[in-house]
Image: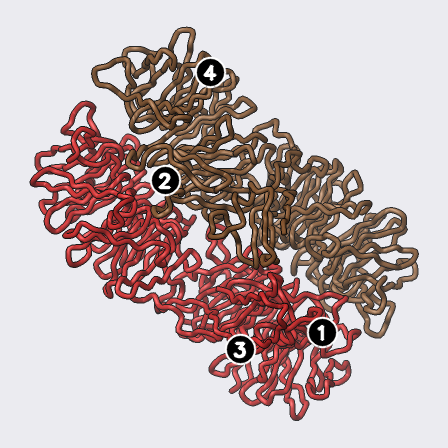
Chain colours: A brown, B red
Amino acid sequence: MKYKILLIFCLYFTLNSISSADWRKPFFRRISTTEGLSQSHVSAILKDSKGFMWFGTDEGLNKFDGYRFSFFKHYPDNPSSIDDNIVFDILEDYDKNLWVGTNNGLNKFDRKKNAFSHFFKEDMHLNVRDIFQDSKHRMWLGTSSGLFLLDLKKGSYTQFRHEQNNRNSLSNDFIFKIIEDKSGDLWIATKNGLDRFNPEKKTFLKYFHDAKKVNSLETNWIKVVYRDHSDNIWIGMLGGGIAKYNPVNNTFKSFKHNPQKANSLAHNDILSILEDRNGRLWVGTENGGISIYNEKEDRFTTVAYDPNDNNSLSNNSIYSLYEDNIGNMWVGTWSGGVNFLPKFGNKFTLYKSILNQNGLNNNIVLSVAGDSDGNIWIGTDGGGLNFFNRKDHSFSAIRNQSGNKNSPNTDYIISVLEVEKDLLALGFHRGGFDLYNRKTGVFVHHLPILNNSNSLSAPSVNTIIKDKDLNLWIGTWAGGLNFYDRKADKFTQYLHDPNNSNSLCDNFINILWEDSDGTVWIGTDNGLDAFNRTSGKFTHFKHNPKDPTSIRNNNILTIMGADKGKIWIGTGGGLCLLDKKTKSFKVVTEKDGLPNNVINGILKDSKGCLWISTNKGVAKYDPQTNIFRNYTIADGLQGNEFKAKSAFQAKDGQMFFGGPNGLNSFYPDSIRDNDFIPPVYITDFQIFNKSVFVGDKDSPLNNEISETTEIRLDHKQSVFHLSSLR
Amino acid sequence: MKYKILLIFCLYFTLNSISSADWRKPFFRRISTTEGLSQSHVSAILKDSKGFMWFGTDEGLNKFDGYRFSFFKHYPDNPSSIDDNIVFDILEDYDKNLWVGTNNGLNKFDRKKNAFSHFFKEDMHLNVRDIFQDSKHRMWLGTSSGLFLLDLKKGSYTQFRHEQNNRNSLSNDFIFKIIEDKSGDLWIATKNGLDRFNPEKKTFLKYFHDAKKVNSLETNWIKVVYRDHSDNIWIGMLGGGIAKYNPVNNTFKSFKHNPQKANSLAHNDILSILEDRNGRLWVGTENGGISIYNEKEDRFTTVAYDPNDNNSLSNNSIYSLYEDNIGNMWVGTWSGGVNFLPKFGNKFTLYKSILNQNGLNNNIVLSVAGDSDGNIWIGTDGGGLNFFNRKDHSFSAIRNQSGNKNSPNTDYIISVLEVEKDLLALGFHRGGFDLYNRKTGVFVHHLPILNNSNSLSAPSVNTIIKDKDLNLWIGTWAGGLNFYDRKADKFTQYLHDPNNSNSLCDNFINILWEDSDGTVWIGTDNGLDAFNRTSGKFTHFKHNPKDPTSIRNNNILTIMGADKGKIWIGTGGGLCLLDKKTKSFKVVTEKDGLPNNVINGILKDSKGCLWISTNKGVAKYDPQTNIFRNYTIADGLQGNEFKAKSAFQAKDGQMFFGGPNGLNSFYPDSIRDNDFIPPVYITDFQIFNKSVFVGDKDSPLNNEISETTEIRLDHKQSVFHLSSLR
């Protein structure tokens, strides 16, 4: 029987569309051997026409689909394997063939057979550094044994070598790079001289370092030649920095490292050059990182490895630079694998505590609140109170100072609230709460007083809210609810009384929320309560296993009002929607698409979608359509786990979510998924639970599975399994 | 048809047997949500009698087999699921039943059904903090509603609560912990007082803080009670530090945090206490890390979170401490998951560059060599020359100082060698080589001189060896071989000459090795050469695809002499053994058990085993038996990838392997595998590629697969698949 297989699966890279007009320190995502790369030295990077990434390392060719790697290594017993593990260059030609240059020769990849053919005979042992196809589709090779022009149809070649007594020959056999200029000349980077070759006339024009000429090349060891989008020719040298060729007067303008000048090129040993689509020239150096040249301002900004920052460049020796069709940047290094920089930056901006960088002073973000100036206050677990100025993106911190009363009572701030302009309330772990006056700098501390029921009932203040009179409702851990009358400086305690069913349901309060009618909603570890101030009674909402309309879970973590008399309740067992009239709950859980049932924080965007922080990332939920779009640490989140009171939305719509590894911020309207969806591929085919490959004995596959349109199986092969990666 | 399944797979934890007599900073391995833990707050840890680890978090119960996690969470629709996601305690009783205490009740786990039964009725909502079985096998519960004595047979219980007017009642309903002392009394930690309960007489003796009594408890909020191996009772308090009970005079000796005293308890809020098998008392605090008490010296050593060290404690709030039957320590924290400390430390000591710690100043270790004093010199990629004093384990560094000739020529040192006592040779990346006299501090630099063939041939010196006259053979990158006559201060260059087949095969030299007969073996990027000094000729060894006895791969990375006229050659495509007589090679590759074919370094231990650093870890290879034992980053290696010249063996047998993330050292004789091999389990059973579980509709399994001894299948279920984890 025949089975036709349809290829309909999806592979895509997700992107952000936040524009980055101003220069921000790039936030790289590292793709190293830890993520599956075969080896750390990445000399070549390419994205092919099918959307797969290819990385050439010292241990084979890597194919990467955004999730998983597959490897192509040299096996002496397999003549169809790549001819060597040290890969220098990868090219997809005009006919979409994939070519790979290695330490041993030139390989052509047959996608259907998942195999390689070798252009040269085995004993050639050609060190192929660069593969270049010119505008006339001629194929050239830069090798350590000279320049090659290939005749692909015949499988033959013409070799151009350095000839000692022939000036019209290659300057040096060792070629690193070849490009073509506007006029059709080839510029060839050799170990001893820069050559300009006319392919029709077969003539060489040569450029060398000339100590007597001011505008000559700085050194003769040419590592890179590059043609930018304006057709300028750039040259990168070993020990000579970079140079821009001036065709008018046939000279070179030099750019070198200047230790006296802050914005000069970082290092004079150049390995790679690339102009991005924004016109910035990226110069990859050896041991100096990347110096990005802004021609208008005539300055270099250097991006380098920072041992304290896992999102900095992974290594300072930049062997390959690649910008793909979407505009993402890929950087291959000497011993740090690949660095990936999405076109528009990450979806979510991440603020962390990083040595020598202005940022948080502690990564564990417990609470976030905004003030009237539009700035952000952050309570941390051990770093005290952090302040984020949203205009200039700067951070500062106010910490407990023993001996100084006018400092936060402790550094462990689990709740923050602006009571009124310039007055903050800070709730501490085992430290009561403070009222902090920003103008005067005065901190007034409030702690429980033993045997005084008019004082704070317990020392750990989980949540603080204000009512319309700007008095405070305070939820504590183990001490129930407190009402604080600020004028009278008096507390009224509300504790759970086992003998009074109208009392607070539980003394462990996680969250408080005031309804528009003055009802105080209280989320505890053991149920949800609604407190009626007039009657002084607590109405309880607990899970009732016999009643499917009861609240789903008693661990109440967060509360947010919704329209039409409804309230969203985030619990440890799903997102619940309470209808105040009917007192019934609907619930949304993992079964419906939530990434995780623990609802730490809920925010709503201008389009009515909810943004929910869980223990497995942040979910965007549209209650109208019931569609989820879930984001994880791979999208740039501080982690997958979040802290319940660290969800905050500023007036302009910007959202903040914090957790144990820092604070994220984003504009929900700016988070779009990639509008480029590459074709999709099946990547694995199994019969009876065993993967089947083209080339296997009796394989039903004639081609690589991702290149297959039809498979014939017999009746015995009755159990098969197709997969595509997600 | 019946199929009987044998259970014969292996699950084990691997250990090291290096003794740790002296105190070293613990090197924790973190098991966090990144590794698969469901949530970061770990309140309970247990290893059951079958060898599985259990972790109780705020989001369910985790079962961990050393490799993978499985989860038990609360699902309201499933009455056999655990009753709540917030787990406080886990106990395996004398009958090997597993009990789990949660925020909602007490659960008993049925291993065969992979399901839970609940001891209490649904509406009890009991907050079960501690489950304790005394020496008479009575089962007690410490809850927030008092003390429970369970009658497991009847399923009933007796509840002891605080009674206002009854002195002979529990001090407070909120219980954190219960233990039993030598005499059979139960010590109960409550929120307001320490109670000593006689289970037979049902009497309570109570201890409180008494400001008037010097040796009373510091506070009343008792969080922990613990009985050590000498039957002492220890008490941990919130705000009161710890206390040791003195039964002779019925008093308490207090230990509190003293900011003036360096070796005092780190913090006064205590969460956990445990005595390890070495007699050290581990005190887990809130926000202070772990203070380990040495009673003999009467001092605490504190272990805390270090943001710059990924192997430090992950978080400073220590909710659970557990020592398993092997002696490994497991630490559960508030927001950092679990920290694992193997009994004897890691197999491999790891030296890294960590802020504020004495260590390397750069993590990329390119070369390692020893000197006559037995100390170690390390060339790094950007940190200059590092020196490791093996006696006191201290590091220091000598870096390039611009303007100071008597400093290393650059900070990028790719080869190091002791020429003679106090004289080192340093080979640089693009910096020639230096001879460094330690006594005088003088550096003599050697660089290529243009057009002078009596100078060094190229600026990058990959490898340096000395001959019996202490002259130097130098292998360069792109410049071939040099012989340096030190007396004459003269270089003789040997380059590849394409017109002379007896010349050096390739100018890119990775490694040199001198044979006992004076032959210089040269490992290049393109073949192995043997240089005969007398004849001046180079004999070549290259891969010949037609000759299976030829060398396997031309990328020669390392060379080590073996007995009986043989030489080990490490290549990019396997480990080769050359027989000098027959000039034939045998090869060992991944197919034979090597973790990876790239052979970076080879060392030999006293038993004749080879230790091989590859790009996927370090392999121990016994050439006699052909058995491999492979180690990876999970065993404590700096990474899986290593640098070729960073393999070094000291005279006393200690081995060093370096790579991009630091330097490892170990004594090969001390690396033993765990002698405890727990029983093995099948963990997955699939029919037609779909996992089958007990409880599924028409499931052939009556019990959990790991508890199953026999499965019956019918003829239709003809394709099945068993797996066990590795």
Farthest residue in the bottom direction?
B201
Chain letter behind tag 2: A
Q: Which residue is mark 4?
A: A232
For the residues bearing labels 4 and 3, Cβ distance under 8 angstroms: no
Left or right: residue A159 compared with residue A70: left
Of tags 1 and 4, the one toward the viewer is 4
- Please, what secondary structure does the residue beneath circle 4 have? loop
* Same chain for the residues under marks 2 and 1 in the image: no
For label 3, the residue is B49
The residue carrying pointer 3 sits among few (fewer than 14), some (14 to 19) or many (20 or more) residues within 10 Å by Cα, namely: some
Chain of the residue under the numbered disc 1 shown in the image: B
- Which of the chains bears the disc numbered 4? A
Identify residue type, mark 1.
Answer: Gly
Compared across the picture, whether B317 is left or right of B201 comes to left
For the question of whether residue B239 can be seen, the reply is no
- Report whether mark 3 lies on the same chain as mark 1: yes
Q: Residue A111 at what x, y percent from top left?
A: 50, 39
Identify the residue position indicated by label 1 in the image.
B105
